Image: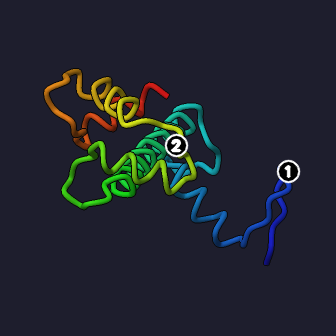
Amino acid sequence: AVVSTQSGHYGREEELDMLMGDIDVDGDGTISLNEFKTMMERLMETNEQDDRQLLEDSFHEFDVYGNGLIGVEDLLYVFRKLGDDEITREEVEMMIIDATGTAKRKEVTLEEFKAVSKGF
């Protein structure tokens, strides 16, 4: 049987029962405030995991040479591939310096990439 909810979503009765069972920990047939909070905390954790995976996937897209680092050449290649022929090597180097905090190293690690990405 298909069940319509007030929000207009449709689902199979069994799916709704399973969802309710996951949320309704004490099995009283209702969702208490504490059960709702727990559900929301789980959703937020899932979103954080999804965000981390998206950042890691993005990093690997920029890591053209597959060496676990994003360098000047990697970024220049990606910018050119995206059609940006105006960005200069110096501008890319400044991006990397901003990410690493030093002019000595011209490559960004995954952790530095994550830290910079959180600012956007």
Identify which amino acid the numbered label 2 is placed on. Answer: Met
Image coordinates of residue 117 in percent, x first then y, are: 41, 34
The label shown at residue 39 is: 2
In three-dimensional space, the C-alpha distance between marks 1 and 2, rounded to whole angstroms, equals: 19 Å
Res. 115 image quadrant: top left
Name the residue located 80 percent from the left edge and 74 percent from the top edge: 2
- 17 and 109: which one is in front? 109
Where disc 1 sits, the SS reads loop
| Residue indicated by mark 1 | 6
The label shown at residue 64 is: none
- 58 and 80: which one is in front? 80
Q: Residues within 10 Å of mark 1 (few under 14, many from 20)?
A: few
Residue 62, above or below 10: above
Residue 18, above or below 85: below
Indicate left or right for 37 with 45 as reference. right
Res. 84 image quadrant: top right
Name the residue located 43 percent from the left edge and 35 percent from the top edge: 88
Quick one: which residue is furthest to the left in this view?
A: 104
Image coordinates of residue 24 in percent, x first then y, are: 55, 49
Res. 3 image quadrant: bottom right
- 5 and 62: which one is in front? 62
Indicate left or right for 120 with 28 as reference. left
Q: Specify which label sits upstream in the sequence, 1 or 2.
A: 1
Image coordinates of residue 68 in percent, x first then y, are: 21, 53
